[in-house]
Image: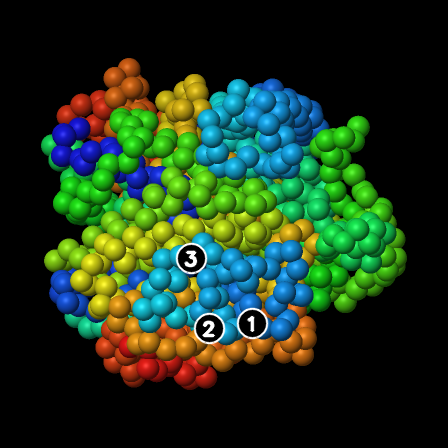
Amino acid sequence: MSLPSKDMMAAIAATRFGLGARPGEIEAARGDPRGFLEDQVRREGADIPKDDGESAPVRYAAFADLRQERRAARQEARMVAGDDMKPIPLVDAPGANAKSEAQRDVQRYIRQKTTGDFLARAQLAADTEAGFRERWALFFANHFTVSQTKQAASIVIGPFEREAIRPHAFGRFEDMLLAASTHAAMLTYLDQAQSVGPGSPAARYQTRKGRRTGLNENLAREILELHTVGVDAGYSQADVTEFARALTGFSIGRAQDPDIGAFVFRANTHEPGARSILGKAYAQGGEDQGLSVLKALAADPRTARHVCGKIAGHFVADDPSPALVKRLETRWIETGGQLGEVAKALIAAPEAWDPTPAKIKTPYEFVISTWRAVGGRPASFERLNPILTSLGQKPFYPPSPKGWPDEAGAWASPDGLVKRMQWTQGFAAAVADTHDPDALARSALGARLSEPTARAVARAETRREAFALLVMSPEFQRR
Amino acid sequence: MTDRSPSPSRRSFLAAAASLGVAVSFVGRQAHAADGAKKLVVVVCRGGMDGLSVAPPIGDAGYAALRGAIAIKPEEALKLDDTFALHPSLTSVHALAKQGQARIAPAIATPDRARSHFEAQDVLETGEAKVYGADSGWLNRTLEVMGPGKTEALSVGTTAPLILRGKVQAASWSPGKGLDEAARLPTLLQDLYKGDPLLGPAFARGLETEAMAQAAMTALAPAPAPAAEGGMMMASTPTMSASRMNQPAMNQPGGRPADNRQGREAARKLGSTMAGFMRQADGPQIAALSLDGFDTHAGQVGQIATRLTYLDAVLDGLHEGLGPEWKNTVVVAVTEFGRTARANGTGGTDHGTGSTALVMGGALKRGGIIGDWPTLSETALFENRDLAPTLDMRGLFKGVLIDHLGVDRAAVEKKVFVDSAGAKAVTGLV
């Protein structure tokens, strides 16, 4: 497979591997397009967004305080009303009465943290000169999805990406898997924190008290199906249940604990006994038992195939060539899952440089790349939220543990395209008047700018129309 | 922008509905969709809906013990017969059942046994015997085999569900700003998209649909929603509604449907607006709708009460909105799999196999349960864990297509549900 021209490769480096070209970016990549990308791969991992930097434990501690205040306020209200005998619900009933001040504080806290995290991440994406590095991190954040659909997880999605994903973006997959599977956000999102081994001391105690406790297999299943070996790996229900038993004890420090919001292993909820998962035996143990399973899953060749197939599908084509997947998989196996080496294998693969752009940008990629085209950045969350929500990619709200879809069919919907156009018109009205459209078209798309689009931009009646045509052109919508 | 777009209030209720995790899709045939035509609505309840809560078998000797604290209490359940009842949130469905216009298939499943949401939804929506069997949905293939005629497919929501993806071009629509007809941009873009096999047809359809939706929404405006907002704020409405409605639904241990009045009202309006679309002269004959949030691993009691309240409200809205057309309609509500027969340790249930389907409509014949009841005795459970399925979901779908919509039997077997010889079409439903 022959490679396209240096000019074309520079344009592909910025738009397909990266997040869209900022002014001058394609020019900077022109001398050595592959080197331009390889230089973005670095041992210390992906960049860290400039949010408030609070860790998951700090967030959970503050949140617990606010909820405590809310409970106290409610208790007081009940005493006044004379019905203090009623139990206090754990979570507010929706729309129950007018919201108290303390209740509003809780809501405000959640909104403030999630919008701050999301904005910082989007600003990093808009500003960075290492677009490929950020795309690589975003891929893995989506691979290990945590979503605001679970309210209790929402304030730690930002910390999750900072603590579990970004540091390991170019390290070993095993380290990322372990970090993700032991992070408060994941343990909350997939219900692991409450799972109790039916034969554990805690379960026996609860049973004596007449309470039912037991396994929750949500996290175990999704690790197998989505994070590691993949749904077609041939595991059985027994494997899922055994894995769920091995993971019992993986939990989070609670409000009354000193280590609130941090990973804790609760030995008294761990299911005793040896386990057998995917044909491998694991001796009786504590925390090490679950960790051993995770390590074995990280090293499983089926994990290499599954994740490499997704990487190729994300960066190159919905239906990537088997040769490309094989290259990535081979490098993964050779290096024991060194993600930096897999990233370099992707850069080296000729299949990744096919001049025909097979992928449609997701709403996030589309919006960020539009800001990058003009060298700008979103100034507030409200600049992002309406458009991303209406295009079906509401900030930090992927619909399921599978994460955001990655295929053209999901995003190139008739409704989505009309909405992209409407948003582009508004964006153009704000920025286009101060830009030379022809120069912008060249700096945003380089050699990927097609003759029909260049002509349409040149012939536009206004700068706004020219800008909208550029951003809505097939080559800008694709990558 | 010209001021042709419908008032924000009309749009905002749909935006609110979208925030409930409801997405609507329409597939219709223009030639057939006037009043009097047979109509089909498929509701996909995503996340693995717990059939044993939808239609609790309170008369089954095993039920109370298996479910413990999350069992539906006999005194609260809405009784159907000696064995079955409906969840207390399903009041409208129960009222229909009393008139013989709602029945349950209490032990139904797709052919998939992997207990994966994504595989099972894929199998449910493609109608295939196994995962990745096809990349088109069975509703779309139904339109294909229903013969020539201008076909119309519309999905309300920004992404098209698999069940209606396929050769028949599906449009999509969701509440937005409306088109500025004076702008040259759409025409210029259509020109640029000429050579693009994906963007070209999709964009053209998007423009058409926006125009049609504007007309439909203007003609069929429901009562304005109370919290109307305009301009740029419109698009952010779903976010705010979602934080009001979705989050408590996910977390609240003992959800009380009365607290979800706002959500219920939005869902009911969604149903009646859908019905309005279907009653239009060139409206859709087939519609699909999906409702999220049924993955009840923890805190199931409150979560499922909320989701079933919304489901009941959508169905109630449909029933009411279809008016005289209800007699020509069948509605089927299904899920990708049921949940474990036993409660898990966290007040919920894990992924299982057999579940309940609801079959409703004025076209329905009175009758008992659809399919057999395997019971919940220890030995009857599938893999000693799940309700054992006795009915292949494709058999139910096939029966509805053949007997209700009048689709040619051979075409259903050969083109819509291939490899489904083992799943005999359920007869005598209508």
Q: What residue is at 28 percent from the left and 15 percent from the top?
A: A434
Q: Is residue B31 visible?
A: yes
Q: Return the mark for residue B90.
A: 3
- Mark 2 chain: B
Q: Chain of mark 1?
A: B
Residue situated in front as seen by the camera: B172 or B333: B333
Q: In the structure shown, which secondary structural element does the residue marked by tag 1 occupy?
A: loop
Query: What amino acid type is highlighted by mark number 3?
Result: Leu
The mark that comes first in sequence, 3 or 2, is 2
Based on the displayed image, in which of its 4 quarters is residue B423 positioned?
A: bottom left
Q: Secondary structure at mark 3?
A: loop
Q: Who's the residue at 23% across and 40% down the image?
A: B223
Q: CA distance from mark 2 to mark 1?
A: 9 Å
Label 3 resides on the chain identified as: B
Q: Which residue is mark 1?
A: B59
Q: Residues within 10 Å of mark 3 (few under 14, many from 20)?
A: many
Q: Residues within 10 Å of mark 2 (few under 14, many from 20)?
A: few
- Marks 3 and 2, how far apart in space? 15 Å
Residue designated by label 2: B81
Q: Is residue A154 above or below residue B277?
A: above
Quadrant for residue B250, please give it.
top right
Residues marked 3 and 1 touching at CB (< 8 Å)? no
Amino acid type, residue under disc 2 in the picture: Asp
Camera-side residue of A181 and A174: A181
Q: Position of residue A444 (x, y in %)?
A: 37, 29
Residue B143 in picture, x, y percent from top left: 25, 68
State if disc 1 and disc 2 touch (CB < 8 Å).
yes
